[in-house]
Amino acid sequence: TGSTRPQRLLKAVQKNASRGDPQSVISAIDRFCHSSEWAMNVGDEKGVILDSVVCEVSPGCALELGTYCGYSTVRIGRLLPPGAKLITLEFNPDYAKVARQVIDFAGLQEKVLLVEGPSGDLIPKMKEQYGITTFDLVFLDHWKDRYLPDTKLLEECGLLRKGSILLADNVICPGTPDYLAYVRSSPRYESKYFKSHLEYTKVEDGLEKSIFLG
Ligand SMILES: O=c1[nH]cnc2c(O)c(F)c(-c3ccc(F)cc3)cc12
Ligand SMILES: [Mg+2]
């Protein structure tokens, strides 16, 4: 039987990147997606915006919703301050299997905890099971219909504090209209749109950065 796209992406990392070098892993995946096969990584253009937000927040504790092959996990993980942790949630076991190998190849396994399962079930367990108080940064990049319910869940579970940053991918393409309406109209958020393009294409997309006001 044939390989899957995530498996071919992993092969490209193992072939073209250097073990323990996160930047080489990022570059190998971007090269694969530009020249070989499109894949739904946040990509190099939106990735630069993600990098700038991670550096600005310098999170001690970060959450990623939607790991896929681990591309943005590596982008975030490589910029974390010493001792900081990133928890990344992935529902699809085949994606998780590839992502673990990409994260390990980049040498970030000490900073990153990948948890398999549905975000709606895992978020309420964050405090008791992983000793989380609050997240300084949340990167939403999973399924568009889960952005709003999972944001409300994070609020209800007391996982956000005054100043916590939510950064959401794909708010234009595929689009998350209910989430956008919520963070842009709620008095509990200050929201800003970063216009960009759908990864590896000329189609418009962007990231929405929202500060939780408490
Ligand atoms: O499901 C997704 N989860 C997370 N990120 C995505 C993404 O960045 C995409 F571009 C897309 C996407 C897929 C097909 C298209 F034609 C356009 C965008 C999907 C996701
Ligand atoms: Mg995305």
Image (spheres, rainbow, N blue to C red):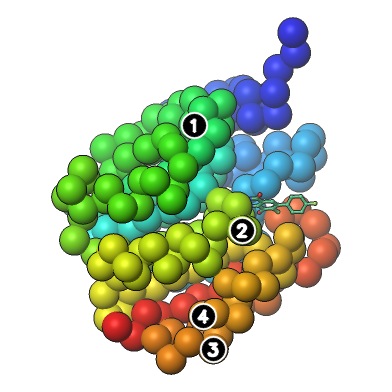
Q: What is the secondary structure assignment of the residue under circle 2? A: helix
Q: Name the residue under label 1.
A: 96
- Mark pair 4, 3: CA separation: 6 Å
- Mark pair 3, 1: CA separation: 35 Å
Q: How crowded is mark 4: few (under 14 residues within 10 Å), some or many (20 or more)?
A: many
Could you tell whether 20 is left or right of 111 in the image? right
- Mark pair 3, 2: CA separation: 18 Å
- Give, as a three-letter code, the residue at label 2: Asp
For residue 46, what is the image quadrant?
bottom right
Circle nearer the N terminus (3, 2): 2
Picture residue at 59% right of the left edge, 44% below the top: 27
Q: On screen, 75 above or below 184?
A: above
Q: Residues within 10 Å of mark 2 (few under 14, many from 20)?
A: few
Q: Can residue 176 be seen in this view?
A: yes
Picture residue at 67% right of the left edge, 73% below the top: 177
Q: On screen, 42 above or below 179?
A: above
Quadrant placement of the C terminus = bottom left
Where is residue 55 shown, x and y percent of the image? 38, 67
Does the beta carbon of the residue at mark 4 sit less than 8 Å from ligand 2?
no
Q: Which of marks 3 and 1 is in front?
A: 3
Circle nearer the N terminus (1, 2): 1
Q: Mark 2 points at which residue?
A: 145
- Mark pair 1, 2: CA separation: 20 Å
Q: On screen, 41 above or below 208?
A: above
Asked if the residues shown at circle 4 and circle 3 are in contact, with their CB atoms under 8 angstroms apart, the answer is yes
Spot the residue most to the right. Answer: 202
- Give, as a three-letter code, the residue at label 3: Ser
